[in-house]
Amino acid sequence: MKIDLTDTTASKINKALVQGRRAIGTPAVGMVLTLVIVTDEENAYDALKAANDASHEHPSRTLVVIKRVSRSPRDRTQSRLDAEVRVGADAGSGETVVLRLYGEVSDHAQSVVLPLLLPDAPVVVWWPVNAPLDPAKDPLGALAQRRVTDTYASEQPVRELSARADTYTPGDTDLSWTRITPWRSMLAAALDQVVCEVKAVEVEGEEFNPSCELLAMWLADRLDVPVKRSLSGGPGLTAVRMDTDCGPIALDRADGSLATLSIQGQPDRAVALKRRETSELIAEELRRLDPDDTYASALRFGVERLNSSAPAPAVRSAEAAEAAVAKAVRAVALAEAAVARAEEPPAEESPAEESLAEDAEESAAKAAGEGSPAKGASVGTPAEIAAKASAKQAKAQDPVTKAAAK
């Protein structure tokens, strides 16, 4: 069922939604979230179709915000809101409202969207194209718990990734990251089957594909090894090769649908790794509404650190050899210093030191003559006896002590 509204308001749109639900016999609202799609007229059909397919898994109220371009100064000063309300089979498993904003009202889209949000339900905003530089500070993005962008649709995807890293806010995500979920799962499962250390990784894919960079940054961030980004004819990601101390591990997908997993010492296996539709990507993102810390860590790793994220194995071996040589040189120097101290002649004792030594010997002889000490008592070591004799002698020679005694 479709209801067209021209030059309308948010209040009239809400009334049309209630009227449409009653007309199809479902007055109750059984939706779990509000999905706001911000797009243009050219991409609205594809985005709406993907959202309707995803609504079969996540029943939602979909609000499509289309900002129409005013071609004359007079049109830019006139504000108008047109709406198309869809319920029932025309809206998937939820409700759909297509909002077309004209004139000055297009600069205040959040004022139109806010009254149409489902009460006490999470809000997700998706920009299929032309996403803002900082989604969290966008007026519509500020209403949402999750903000979904797609750097694959931008003109310079790699530069867009760097901008996303600079403005990342918990709750941000990107469909280029969602596209590599099967790859990450398959690579993690492959490493679980072997006990070895990864030394280097190579990620191969078509140029200007941000998913390749994100997968390479994720591997470099998690494995702490050098990752090489190489180019291929596509489609999308084509191969990931890992060099380990147990032999090479490769995941190769040449045709975009079926991949081959190769592990040293095991037979090759064919795995399904097809390129997914946008509706599947949106449905995956709607399954979780909490911040994606793994995406944040990989994004902040930085595209510029790829191909030089860590020293090569030969460089690490050279550095270890230099450290071992330096340690050996220090050990030889310490040994030579100890030998030199051992060869020095003993210093002659002064008369005062001879007197102290004699007093210590007399005290030790006296203690030995009196018999063994009582249980729990301690005679002291020769060094302690010598220290006590020295203290007595200094006290006897102190003029202040002599005067006090007189």
Image (cartoon, grey):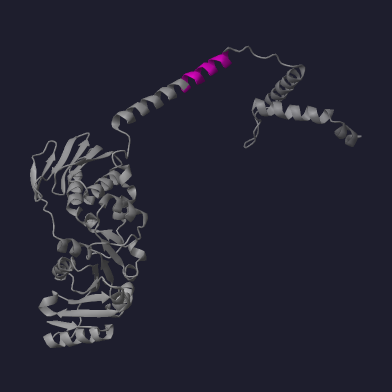
Residue 197 visible in the picture:
no
Main secondary structure along the magenta-highlighted residues:
helix
Residue 273 visible in the picture:
yes
Most foreground residue, 163 or 398: 163
Most foreground residue, 178 or 71: 71
Q: Residue at x 11, y 53 (%)?
A: 274
Q: Position of residue 286 (x, y in %)?
A: 22, 66
Q: Quadrant of residue 328?
A: top left
Q: Position of residue 222 (x, y in %)?
A: 29, 46
Q: Is residue 91 left or right of residue 355?
A: left
Q: Quadrant of residue 295?
A: bottom left
Q: Which residues are magenta?
A: 330-342
Q: How many numbered marks does the figure carry? A: 0
Image quadrant for the C terminus? top right
Q: Is residue 54 left or right of residue 143?
A: left
Q: Residue at x 36, y 54 (%)?
A: 166
Q: Position of residue 275 (x, y in %)?
A: 13, 54
251 lies above or below 105: above
Farthest right residue in view: 406
Q: Quadrant of residue 106?
A: bottom left
Q: Is residue 331 within the magenta segment?
A: yes
